[in-house]
Amino acid sequence: MEFVALSNATQLGSFNPLRTNLQKVALAKPSSALTHPPTSTHNIFGPHSADFELSALTALSPLDGRYWGKVKELSPFLREYGLICFRIKWLLQLSQIPEIVEVPSFSEGATIFLQGLIDDFSVDDALEVKNIERVTNHDVLEFFHFACTSEDINNLAHALMLKETMNSVMDKIIKALCDISEDNAHVPMLSRTHGQNQCIIVGSFELLLYERLLRILGKFSGAVGNYNAHVVSYPEVNWPHIAEQFVQSLGLSFNPYVAQIETHDYMAKLFHLLIQFNNILIEFDRDVWGYISLGYFNQTTKAGEVGSSTMPHKVNPIDFENSEGNLGVANGGTLLNLSYLIISLLYLALTHSMHAFYLAVSLLCFHSPKIERDLTDSTVLRNMGVGIGHSLLAYKSTLREIGKLQVNEARLSEDLNQCWEVLAEPIQTVMRRYGVSEPYEKLKELTRGRAVTQKSIRDFIEGLYIPEEAKMNLLKLTPDTYVGAAVELARTVKNVVNTVYGRKI
């Protein structure tokens, strides 16, 4: 048998294990294997490629492939499994209504069994449900579905999916930023507006406090929201009260005024708040990425980790970059079905209250344009996991990068000592207080387009006609002491967050 080598041993060299392995592979292959391309049976682009089993390497979405280990905690809630799992409780509720004799009150053992189906619902159980639905092409099962349109079941399932999902890592993000503020409250940093040196801030960051008190709503009122079938079948039952009790028993708020589907206005609010939170985090990722490039932060290194593919000295802030990218994907997925509504949304934003705006968003993006409803919203809501999954992935990346940050106080101090022009603001403000004419113009003449030093600033202050005490206070100022109340604000930021939240993060 003839063998083909890629090169001889001396050419390959023993220092490169990859080349050595390639050499071994080449020596073990007959020449025909190297000179003839594989048949289409083994070609990933061939006709059999569609038969691949789902795996991290074959998944269409990176959430189900490359990133599965980082987002799989959402799987019980946001996949088809979660949608089925949350559908079961209505039969138990019917058994507790004396007037519905067709569903007698279950014995304790039967109730425990049914509750066990809910508590221990498995993937195998969900697969059995899907097998039944393949025959019915629907989810109707006798009194499991009594007087219900499918949306009665599904809107509660979607609400519960969101309710569980939003107990997320957002709190950890906010806590991490509060911790940075507290730990570095004493460290002054040169801030920049319009890319120019401005006044001094300390280690605190602007936060958008996510609105966790948003009510997640549910309906259970039949095909058009009026309990029509309920009342005809059992007119003696107070169906609005029963529906409200049932929805609230699930930990949801009841929406009494609906058509066939729950109006989804709470979803519109929730998703817009999610996008708003993500936008703030995008700016945070970008800002701290910039601070790293300025040397204000160092990143802790990890043994064995490659910082750059070609430059060994580098430690790239890849987690901030991954976070920013995933936040963009998340926002795009969440806003996907809003893209064709821009004109209507702008009009509503300009002419109505914010409540009307949110309601219109929900009506436009989730309500079908086909009178009462069709299944357009069902398709959209099955993709909630795209935006939420990429958000979770981004939050974890940001947290990982925050954990690597170390404040470089020496670099911060170096920058501050070269920027005495930032004291122009307090000097001209004190000049205004004591009636000195044209304070702004005089400081502009001193600082704009010129090198400003400690000596030039002190000479200017010495020449001011202001009270001696005020002059001495200005002379004591340095770039690193001109911080106002920033230290106290940074140290108490967690208290403020807890007050707004109404609980401890």
Image (cartoon, rainbow, N blue to C red):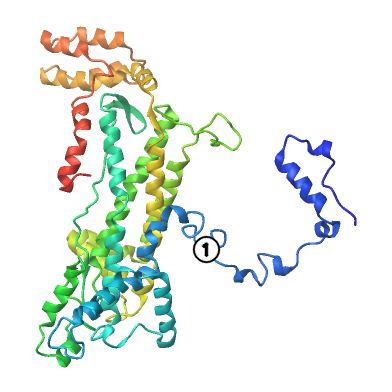
Q: Secondary structure at mark 1?
A: loop
At x 22% / y 54%, what residue is drawn? 212
- Residue 254 appears anywhere in the view: no
At x 23% / y 59%, what residue is drawn? 349
Residue situated in front as seen by the camera: 314 or 166 = 166
**For the view shown, which residue lies furthest in the front direction?**
109
Where in the figure is residue 406, as x and y percent of width and height?
A: 39, 29
Q: Is residue 454 above or below residue 307?
A: above
Q: Which quarter of the picture shows residue 460?
A: top left
Q: Amino acid at mark 1?
A: Leu
At x 20% / y 65%, what residue is drawn? 251
Q: Is residue 82 above or below residue 453?
A: below
Where in the figure is residue 227, as x and y percent of width and height?
A: 17, 84
Residue situated in front as seen by the camera: 83 or 61 = 83
* Image quarter of the N terminus: bottom right
Q: Which quarter of the picture shows residue 175?
A: top left
Where in the figure is residue 347, as x and y percent of width and height?
A: 25, 63
At x 31% / y 64%, what residue is drawn? 343
- Residue 372 appears anywhere in the view: yes
* Image quarter of the C terminus: top left
Mark 1 = which residue?
60
**For the view shown, which residue lies furthest in the bottom direction?**
232
Total numbered labels placed on residues in the image: 1
Residue situated in front as seen by the camera: 505 or 469 = 505
Where in the figure is residue 20, as x and y percent of width and height?
A: 75, 42
In the rendered view, does 454 fall on the left or right side of 300? left
